[in-house]
Image: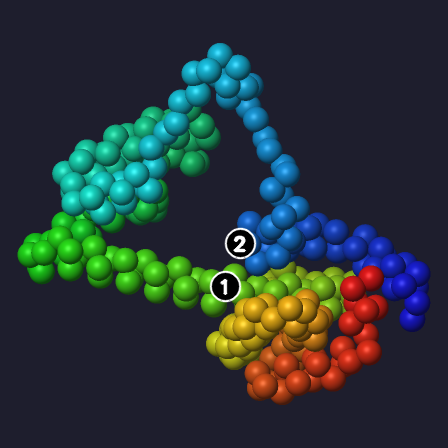
Amino acid sequence: MTRKEMKKQARQTVKRHYALFLAICLVSAFLGSEFSDSIKSIKTYSTEFTHAAVSGTVATSKGVVDVAEDIAAGDTESGRKLFKKIEKEHIDASKKQNPAFGRSRGVFAQILNGVTSGSLLVTLASGMNSLFGSQNVTLAILLVFCLAAVLSFWILIVNTFAVMSRRMFLEGRVYHKVPAQRVLFLLRVKKWLRASKTMLTVSIFQFLWSFTVIGGIIKKYSYYLVPYIMAETPSIKSRDAIQLSREMMNGHKWQCFF
């Protein structure tokens, strides 16, 4: 197939599944998996913010990061006062919106308020201080826990989303109707961890090759088909998927670049 023929088929596929593909790309961009550069240039300013910026009276609101900073500084009491203030601001703001999104009553409202205001973080830190009796031990444990949580999210969700999105693109190319729940096909076939392991291996290899002069650029296209291979055959082993991608891209890297 020539590029002209591929573009023609691609346009037809996008027209059939425009909303689905757009949603997948947006989710991928917000997760930071792919296409993140495409939304960096999109900046939405409200009228109030614009006027405030012109007059030089831009106000910044506190958040859970500020609560975490107070806890890291050893001032748990200040963090407690701050999260109560943030929680009250969120509840007052929700009353001006749709009642369905209220945050003053209900179990889910309490959970959401606890996460966004930082109250769960303060409660956890206070409990650990009482248990271990040392601020340094508490901060060390919280740091390790947060680091493990961030790495797990990146490995299991962000880095694996490329495989899930490729599966949707491949199915959209063949089928006229693709249910949105097909994005969780890895979970259905019980191959989520295998796909995560394969994509992690590719990321590590790509990172190591980036220290060479030109190897990082070449290997980017050598491993280009790994997400597609995993999307098509999720049971394949990591080493086999990488080797197959290298063999399939042999002689086609320049075409892929274009």
* Structural distance between the alpha carbons of marks 1 and 2: 8 Å
Is residue 237 positioned above or below 4 on the image?
below
Q: Is residue 98 left or right of residue 184?
A: left
Residue at image position (56%, 75%) is 205
Pointer 1 with pointer 2, Cβ within 8 A = yes
Residue at image position (83%, 68%) is 255
Is 100 or 122 nearer to us in this picture? 122
Dot label at residue 157? 1
Is residue 107 positioned above or below 48 on the image?
below
Q: Is residue 215 left or right of residue 205?
A: right
Residue under numbered circle 2 = 31
Q: Residues within 10 Å of mark 2 (few under 14, many from 20)?
A: some
Residue at image position (78%, 80%) is 250
Q: Quadrant of the C terminus?
A: bottom right
Residue 22 image point, x, y percent: 68, 50
Toward which corner of the image does residue 195 lie, by quadrant?
bottom right
> Identity of the amino acid at label 1?
Ile
Is 127 or 133 nearer to us in this picture? 133
Is 150 or 28 nearer to us in this picture? 150
